[in-house]
Image (tube, rainbow, N blue to C red):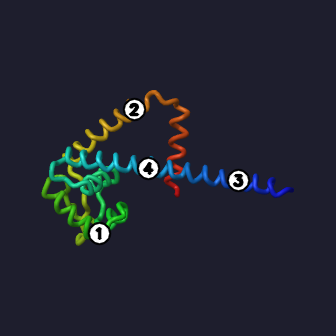
Amino acid sequence: MTESDRAAGGDARDRGASDLDDAIASVEREFGSLFVKLRTRMRAQALEVDPQLPPFGYIMLGALARSGPMHAGALAEELYADKSLVSRQASQLEQLGLLRREQDPVDRRATYFAATDEARRRLEAIANRNRAEMRSGLADWDVSDLHLFAQLMHRLNEL
């Protein structure tokens, strides 16, 4: 093997690494754009639920609506948040009439947080609109592309 043959092989590897770096940078840019859009949308949806509702409160209500009543510690764990933040936010949500505290029937000293019926109604209206927008936006995609996209998103969520 000549020097130029070795150099050509090295160039191919360098191009391969460069292509990989470019592809990863593209994914990072798209995630950055998606993150900004999601954050903006979440802020708007929180305000739609209640003008005084911060985005984290919206996230908490969504978790409670999906999972049902939860202890503060379990909710904090699910949201990767500090328990004191969850407790402070719960007090604000309670004042807004979006959260209620329920006594734990097993341990009467403990309480659960639960989304109120009104909070669930408001969240469901937003979720229905989101599903309709998603369906409309993806209606012209091939079904096989949607399945592939879902599989790739799942792989990404496994990282």
Residue 83, numbered label:
1
Disc 1 and disc 4: Cα gap in Å? 28 Å
The residue positioned 63% from the left and 54% from the top of the image is: 17
Q: Name the residue at 29% across, 47% down.
A: 40
* Residue drawn at 22 percent across, 43 percent down: 122
Distance, label 2 to label 1, CA atoms, is: 37 Å
Closest to the observer, 62 or 13: 13
Label 4 secondary element: helix
* Residue identifier under label 2: 137
**Residues at marks 3 and 4 touching, judged by CB atoms closer than 8 Å:** no
Point out the tag, 1 or 3, that comes first from the N-terminus.
3
Q: Which of marks 3 and 4 is in front?
A: 3
Distance Cα–Cα, label 3 vs label 4: 30 Å
Crowd band around label 2 with a 10 angstrom C-alpha radius: few (<14), some (14–19), many (20+): few
Earlier-in-chain disc, 2 versus 4: 4
Q: Residue at x 36, y 65 (%)?
A: 77
Q: Which of marks 3 and 2 is in front?
A: 3
Binning the other alpha carbons within 10 Å of mark 1 as few (below 14), some (14 to 19) or many (20 upward) gives some
Q: Tag 1: residue type?
A: Lys
Where does the image place residue 1, in percent across and percent down from the top left? 86, 56
Inspect the image, locate mark 2, and give the three-letter code of the amino acid beneath it.
Gly
Mark identifier at residue 11: 3
Looking at this rendering, what residue extends furthest in the left direction?
95
- Residue 110 picture quarter: bottom left
* Cβ atoms under marks 3 and 2 closer than 8 Å: no
Pointer 4 residue: 31
